[in-house]
Every structure is written in C-alpha cells, then in structure tokens.
Amino acid sequence: MVGSLNREDEPVGVLVLATQRRSGFRSEHEELATALLEPFAIALENDRQLRELSVLREAVEADNRSLLARLGRQDISDSVVGSETGLKDVMERVNLVAHSDVPVLILGETGSGKEVVARAIHKGSQRSAGPFLRVNCGAIPPELIDSELFGHERGSFTGAVATRKGWFERADGGTLFLDEVGELPPAAQVRLLRILQDGSFERVGGQRPLHVDVRVVAATNRDLHALVADGSFREDLWYRIAVFVVRIPPLRERIEDIPTLAGHFALRAAKRLGTPPLVPTPQDNDLLVSYDWPGNVRELSAVIERAAILGMGRRLEVAAALGVNTRIAPREANNARLLPAVEVRGADAIVTLDSAMAQHIKLALSRTHGRVEGPHGAAKMLGINPYTLRARMRKLGIDWTSFRET
C-alpha cells in the first residue's frame, strides 16, 4: 500500500506499508493509512525546514567568524572546549594577554592542553596571520638544540652541507611555542635570553647577527622555581619568560568539562574511523567523571578513541576502554573514583584495530561460554549479525569452541 505525502500540493515523501500476507490489507487499513498521510507529511516538512535552518545558521555563524577575523577581533574561545566552564578563568587570562606582545609562560601537567591554550593566545594576537610553530625542547638532543632553534651555517659542523634556518627564523612575524622549556640546556638558555632581550642571535658557525620579530610562548610541567633554586634554570631567563603566567588546572579539578570533552573526542573518533557519530551515554559520563585522569585531556582523548574502536562503530565501550570495573569507591570524603580492574594503558599506547576487536570479541565469547548465536550469544551482545561475527573471528584467528564449557 503506497500513499503520497504532500504539503501545499508539493510532494515531500511517500508512505509505504507492506505485508507478508497475500491480500493482507483490508478497507480499515486503507482508512488508517489515509489518516496517517497528513501528520507524516507535516513531520517530514518540519524536519526539512529544521535542517534548512541549521544550514543557514551555520552559514551565518561562519560569516560572523569571517567578519570578526577581518576586524582582528576573533573569538579566541570558540576552539577551546571548556572555555565557559572549567577553563573560564584560564580563557579570561588568555583574553587579557593575547593582544599584548609580552612573553607568556603556561604551566600545567602533561596532557592538560598547554598547546591548545598557546594556539588560542596566538589566534587572539596581532600575529594571528603569521606562523605558529611548536618546538618540544625536551625531544631535541642537547648537542642539536642550538642548531634546531637558531639554525646553522654551511660547514659549521660535520654534516652541515647547507645553511639552515632555525625555528626562530621560521617563526619570524609569528609565535614560537617552546614546549617543555625547563628541559633547555644552559647554553641554549643564554641564547634564548638574548633573543628575548633584543631579538638578535647568530646561527651556529655564523658571525653576522640576525634579528627576528617573534613572540615566545613557553610551557612546562616542571617546577621552574625549584630548577632556579638548584641552578639548572637561569633566574634571569625565568623573569623574562614569566612576564605573564597562565596556569591550566588538571582535568581532575574541572570534571564539569569531561562530558563535553568526551563528546568532542567521540565525534572526532567517529570521523577518523569512518563510523556514524557516537555520543557518550549518561552512564559513560558517570564512569568518565569518576576517573582521576592522570594523563589529563590527552588520556581522555585516547580512551574515547579506544572506546570507539572496541564498540566497533556502534557504541562507545567506555568501561572496557578504561580497563575498569564499575565499582565506585570513595575518592576522599564524598567524591568517588573508579577502581581499576586492570592496569590502564598510557595515553600514547595505541593498539591496532584488529587487536582491539579480537580482545573485545574474546571478552564477549568468554561471557557467553563460546555461544555465538541466539538471544544469549556473543553476536547479540555485540550487536552484529552472527554470520558477520563468525567471519571476523575467522579473519582474526579466534576459535570460539575454546570458550565452551567442558
């Protein structure tokens, strides 16, 4: 039985009713279907109009952002998740300092989002049209740090077959983000101090002073006061880079941001994995906010991506991704935290997709004692067709008979 869905004499869809019985429709069915045509047509038309309004709203917002950028008044909070909640104080300080040209020091634990804040400072500055370059000072060997930061002349050392610009020259007119600045060796600290004082330096092996116009934003997870006290960090450099300090609270101190961050990372994971959009459930969020997050935002991002992989694109397996059971224990007085069932992998430890799938399938098989089909089988638990599950098990080399009770 087929009926046309029309609004103002314009077709908006078709209502199709099917039956497996021969001559299964009677006159009362036709009357019921006719009564459904108008409300279904209205619903479809409303949905179309809502989608059109959404597209128009996005276009207007894009135009507004473009106009603000041309006026040099970009909304520097729109790319920072939590700018209106847990990071509100941080973003207020970012807004204060962005338009000035002074050095900024960002303090925060590993994975807390120091680079995101540094980019927000650059975006809101008068240098936003210039380059933003990040250098991890702790990842460069001490013997190469001068060459990497300040460049070198041809023939200045073995292997220097050509003149090379350093990070400061490449960042000229923009912002240079020196991550883990506390790891700089003493010699590099002296040269950095000179650049901050007058913008001049020489390449390694060079005799001619060069000048650059670079804003330095530095960051560290170390206690620079302690480094100054033990003599491993120059006190005069500390005063130069810490003209304005921004402290980022760890994720465990801004749990109100966790659901929003989790939703953001879930959508990003779905896009990367090519799956439909995924959204954490209220139960997922309860687990997430109960965890301490020693790896901060970076760990949360890794956990959500792992949850998307374990859920095979159908759901987020947050508990499995965290490697925890669902028991909740007191954190201090009234707060709660998750009790790990197994050791949680580091935020940077990523397993292959096949390994994650195999682990998850084996977990389902162990709970169903090797049963694949049926209402209590692994396929039902995983939400996939039994034939699909068997094919994946063959591909992954999983013997489901080994999970059967003897």
Image (tube, rainbow, N blue to C red):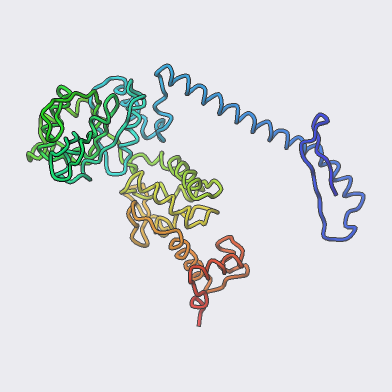
Q: At which x and y percent is residue 365?
A: 51, 70
* Furthest-top residue in this view: 71
Looking at the image, how many numbered discs can be counted on the residues? Answer: 0
Query: Is 246 displayed left or right of 308 in the figure?
Result: left
Give the side of residue 195 with respect to residue 82, left or right.
left
Residues 262 and 73: in front is 73
Q: Which x, y percent locates residue 63?
A: 52, 22
Query: For the point 82% across and 60% down, which residue is it?
Result: 20
In this rendering, position of residue 138 left or right of residue 70: left
Q: Quadrant of residue 174?
A: top left
On the image, the x and y values in percent for residue 327 come to 41, 58
Q: Residue most toward the right?
A: 27
Residue 57 occupies quadrant: top right
Residue 305 appears left or right of 251: right
Above/below status of 40 relative to 245: below
Identify the residue at image location x=81%, y=50%: 17
Instruction: Indicate whether 231 appears above or below 30.
Output: above
Please tell me in which quadrant of the rendered image residue 142 appears: top left
Residue 326 at what x, y percent from top left? 43, 57
